[in-house]
Amino acid sequence: MVISAPFPRARRQAFTLVEIMVTVAIISVLALISVGAYTKYLAYADNAACIMRMKDVGAGLANYTLSRGEWPQFPESLENVEEEKVWEWWINKLEPYGVAPVAWLCPADERMRKQAFKRDGTPREKYEGTYIPTYFDTGADTPFKWTTPWLVERGAYHPNGQNILLSNRSIVPFKNPVSRPQRPKK
């Protein structure tokens, strides 16, 4: 008489080394693709946030000009002071008109400053800014007359170049033209 087990022994299933290696390779390729796409979309997001912040500062400048009847004039007595004092003056001047201190910084510039702080350990300044306001005379309608920039980004932090806020409230990119070698004439 043969006695058999009531259930047959189940065979243990396991992944082979080849299957594991293929899975790791696929995940690695997907990670590389997503990192490239992440940096590209981060640059687009930075540019969009930069444009919104420039518009906030531009709205504060317009509100100041309309309510005070003049463009804010940076005092000549502060022209040779350190940069932090300049930004302190601008930030404090426009804060009552709804411009938060963070609106003065481009997100890409802000990220680069934070990375620089981590590397060298120097403390960041309390008052910082990326957008440089244009100097106009004290006339209330002068900033609205011309297609003169109201704000200019101090550096080219975006793939399309510097952002410039014009008096018609449009923001245009400015990319420094690259000089190409000229072909010799025949």
Image (cartoon, helix red, strand yellow):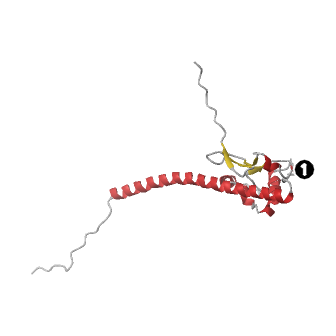
Q: Residue at x 33, y 62 (%)?
A: 15
Question: What amino acid does circle 1 point to?
Answer: Ser
Q: Residue at x 37, y 55 (%)?
A: 22
Q: Residues within 10 Å of mark 1 (few under 14, many from 20)?
A: few
**Where the C terminus falls, by quadrant?**
top right
Which residue appears farthest toward the top when viewing the image? 186
Which residue appears farthest toward the right when viewing the image? 77
> Quick check: 62 left or right of 118?
right
Q: Position of residue 128 (x, y in %)?
A: 75, 55
The residue where tag 1 is placed is 77
Q: Position of residue 21 (x, y in %)?
A: 37, 55
Tell me if residue 136 comes above or below residue 69 in the rendering: above
**Where the N terminus falls, by quadrant?**
bottom left
Tell me if residue 64 comes above or below residue 180 in the rendering: below
Residue 142 versus residue 76: which sits nearer the camera? 142
Tell me if residue 23 comes above or below residue 158 in the rendering: below
Residue 164 versus residue 111: which sits nearer the camera? 164
Name the image quarter holding residue 20: bottom left
> Quick check: 107 left or right of 23?
right
Q: Position of residue 89 (x, y in %)?
A: 83, 56
Name the image quarter holding residue 147: top right
How many numbered marks are there?
A: 1
